[in-house]
Image (cartoon, grey):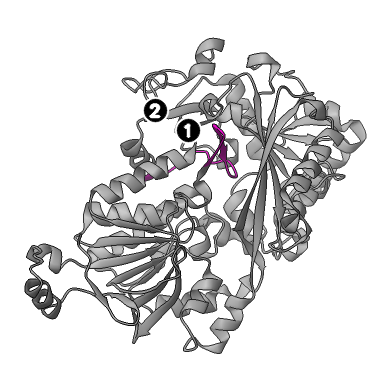
Amino acid sequence: QSRWELTTSSQRYYRPSWFICGILARENVFYSLSEVTKRKAIIIGAGPAGLTAALELLRQTDIKPIVLEQTDMIGGISRTVNYKGYRIDIGGHRFFSKSDEVVEWWHKILPPAGKPAWDDRILGREIPAIEGGPDPEETDRVLLIRKRLSRIYYLKRFFDYPVTLSLNTLKNLGPERVARIITSYAKVRLFPIKQEKSLEDFFINRFGRELYETFFRDYTQKVWGVPCSEIKPDWGAQRVKGLSISKVLAHGLKKAFGRLGDVRQKSTETSLIEWFFYPKFGPGQLWEEVARKVKSLGGEILMEHKVVGLKRSGNRIIEAEVIDLRSGGKHFIEADFFFSSMPVRELIESLGDDVPAEVRRVASGLKYRSFMTVGLLLNRLKIRNETPIKTLNGLIPDNWIYVQEKEVKLGRLQVFNNWSPYLLKDRNKVWLGLEYFCDEGDELWNMEDRKFAQFAVDELSKIDIIDKSEVLDYTVLRMPKTYPAYFGTYEEFHVIKDYVNEIENLFLIGRNGMHRYNNQDHSMLTAMRAVDNIRKGIKSKENIWAVNVEGEYHEEKNKGAA
């Protein structure tokens, strides 16, 4: 192994030096000069950002990555949990990106399919397969190409997502409400809100007040636990991006008169994407494969190792204090570079008492929203497929269903069958993910698993999606700090950013690492930019912070443009 250990009252991993070489020679332990002089990088977190950074360091530099993961699973929130042969994708992860760099990176790990998946094949559904790609029936190392369908469930009816002014929408809403929607949208086009101070302003400018109150207000409050009027508009810029009624209508026309098209769909708004790549066994499959590559190329991944301290000397971090959660042992690991995808609040705490009081105050005020999933196995659903899309056993064709019903706390429903049929041990069953947004320590979070699962089943029955007698099994999963929030002290985040940017060998990457609601492709790009900067000797970190910042929005938001 290429790690040097000295045992005193605690254990330390030292950077190589001639002193260490002398000890190794005396003990008849021999290493090549290249191993002894190799630089190291500590990477906190084995999610998409951390693992991307590790693999890029190994591919492009002479720096050895040591990945420290607090949990016992690879992939962060992009992990896949296997429950009795039924796999759960926590949150749902479409492998779609407008970045060729990211797409090609994925394809080097798992090649895209050249043949349809099992269910597409049986049903004769056409997919834009990649010529020469592998057959998912013959190999597991493959990215499926899947059709996306997400809908809104409201008034116990299905609506298009994103909302369209289709005949189905008009019929479900009724003429009076439709008239109010059109009138309020026309009004905001003529008299937009000039300065968007909140997420509420952002939505109203793009959809009008009536449509915002019908489809956006209550669901968004479910997600964040606070009103849209208290959330900064930046979240909308990153998640809804350039979407508006006019773009939805334009996309509808293009879809009506277009053809199957390119699976990459680079010119399409993210919320309108119709095709996506997906690992045969869920997103965790890809990141587990990346972890294997990291190890095979000489990197280290230490599971259940929590970073509790970072020692600073001048404008550099020199050492990480790490707890082995299995043994309780403490380690001190020196390195040349440090990548952090841990929550910013915890990062600032780990830097100790030397952090300025103002930075500590802003960090302590950062908020997070957590996430719970109930994996629910059933014989069948109560609701049936009434779309023209062919499915097996009358199953609804949706990947996601956004639950807008006000009388339940359920936020979103995943139908895992439609992500990949290979996620199920028994393909004749229905495998659901019931998603709840909550805060660590609140009533939902603290509810005992059996009681919470029953609560979720009761809610799904109340809105007529299932019959409780069809439920076969369940499991409950909790994911803390899933969503960095755009309220609390978020408006002052620049104080933290300015402080950490001064630490020249510390790179904040990923969703929690940057306190930014990134998708996994954006998280990967932040890691890629960080490695590029090290390789090229670039000191500025602005290109990392620039990932997933909607330039057009930020340039125009003060003009009230929609």
Q: Which residues are magenta?
A: 81-102
Mark 1 or mark 2: name the one nearer the start of the chain: 2
Q: Residue at x 47, y 24 (%)?
A: 261
Disc 1 packing (10 Å; few <14; some 14–19; many ≥20)? many
Q: CA distance from mark 1 to mark 2?
A: 8 Å
Mark 1 residue type: Phe
Above or below residue 338? Residue 221 is above
Q: Position of residue 227 (x, y in %)?
A: 78, 60
Q: Residue at x 78, y 25 (%)?
A: 168
Q: How many marks?
A: 2
Q: Quadrant of the N terminus?
A: bottom left
Residue behind mark 2: 140
Horizontal side, residue 40 vs residue 148: left or right: left
* Residue 194 magenta: no
Per the image, label 2 sits on a secondary structure element best described as loop
Disc 2 packing (10 Å; few <14; some 14–19; many ≥20)? some
Q: Residue at x 75, y 24 (%)?
A: 381
Above or below residue 533? Residue 465 is above
Residue behind mark 1: 281
Q: Nearer the viewer, residue 250 or 231?
A: 231
Q: Mark 1 touching mark 2, by CB under 8 A?
A: yes
Horizontal side, residue 560 vs residue 555: left or right: right
Q: Nearer the viewer, residue 144 or 242?
A: 144
Mark 2 residue type: Asp
* Residue 82 magenta: yes
Q: Position of residue 148 (x, y in %)?
A: 58, 30
Q: Position of residue 552 (x, y in %)?
A: 53, 55
Q: Nearer the viewer, residue 185 or 389?
A: 389
